[in-house]
Amino acid sequence: MSPDDRVYAYSAVLLGSPILLKLFDHNQTLAARVFRLIKQQEILLTVNRPHSEVMSINHAAGESPVVVSQPVFELIARARAASVLPGSLFNFTIGPLVKRWKIGFHGNSVPPLAEIQALLALTNPHHVILNDRDRSVFLQKSGMEIDLGAIAKGYIADLVRDFLRQEGVEDALINLGGNVQTLGGAADSESGSWGIGLKKPFAGPDELIGVINVRGKSVVTSGVYERYFELAGKRYHHILDPRSGYPLDNELLSVTVISADSIEGDIYTTLLYGMGVEKGLAYLAARPEIEAIFVTRDGQVISSSARQFTFTLLDEDFHQA
Ligand code: ADP
Ligand code: MG
């Protein structure tokens, strides 16, 4: 390892998550610019503060269309398209339910069934009207709320990658709390690739099921163990089933997507999470550019295919199927 191959890690807390940037140059200024870029995006997209472009759309629900910036309009169009796919459990109008459940935030509780049903009526993605002539977004019913939580980090991870590329950076990694995007490989490792840990669900923060090795790819994991609360012996996690209004309940503990773009990874983790293993594998058979690793409650680790990555299993409680 030459002195040039040393990795420099920079961290911050943004988007409600710990953010990690790895570079092979000591460049505090560049790191600060990356964090500023992320912060600027958070200001546009967040629904966890009273004001943002997305919140201005939510505030005008049932009243009037709101004109937004081109990138925000495009991101919303993307989220809507994923939400109206036949059978999709991705739903970017899930906001009223997310707000009510408050999973991962202070004061979470299990809402009464009647309340959940009333809120479900406000989560129809077809009720979001996009007008690309004036870039306006209209939520047709009062009380509707867009939530880009399942897509924003992926989108921002790609922006960071593009920015670093523009700056001439060849090897780097950005981790936005579970959304990892990479440029090149890790110059300090023998394999020349980035090793990204697949977390062991409900275990210590450093415990891994295994390691995913990639070069210049995105690795996004969505898991039921990321944000949840427990009540009367039951766990309630943060990915909601838009059909029932309750947390998605199936055989999966996590889904990881390996792809070129992190926005795809972010969308597909939620889509595949909803499909489960069998349907998910069938769905991916026709999409070689998107690859997934499913982790099931009974300890299986199942990959769709592995052209863009290698996986090394480390934990004996799990086995590769
Ligand atoms: P994280 O990296 O925070 O785990 P995910 O990509 O798994 O994020 O998305 C989860 C977030 O997306 C939730 O916190 C919520 O804001 C929103 N969300 C919850 N259920 C759905 C759903 N069915 N479709 C789209 N977004 C959802
Ligand atoms: Mg997601």
Image: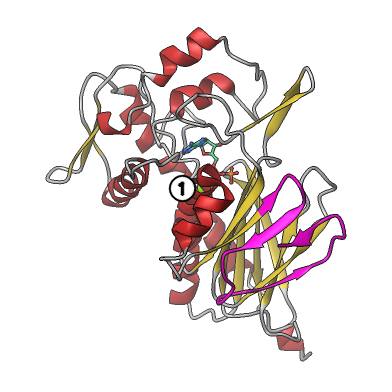
Pick the residue in front: 203 or 38.
203
Residue 1: image location, x then y, percent: 79, 90
Give the residue displayed 36% in from the left and 21% down from the top: 122
Give the residue displayed 46% in from the left and 51% down from the top: 267
Q: How many marks?
A: 1
For residue 302: magenta?
yes
Pick the residue in front: 26 or 54.
54
In the displayed image of the protein, which residue is found farthest to the left?
133
Residue where numbered disc 1 is placed: 151
Residue 100 placement, left or right of 87: right
Pick the residue in front: 165 or 286.
286
**Depicted 129 relative to depicted 287: above or below:** above
In the displayed image of the protein, which residue is found farthest to the right?
316
Circle 1: residue type: Ile
Q: Residues within 10 Å of mark 1 (few under 14, many from 20)?
A: many
The residue range painted magenta reads 295-321
Residue 166: image location, x then y, percent: 43, 75
From the Cβ of disc 1, is ligand 2 less than 8 Å away?
A: yes
For residue 74: magenta?
no
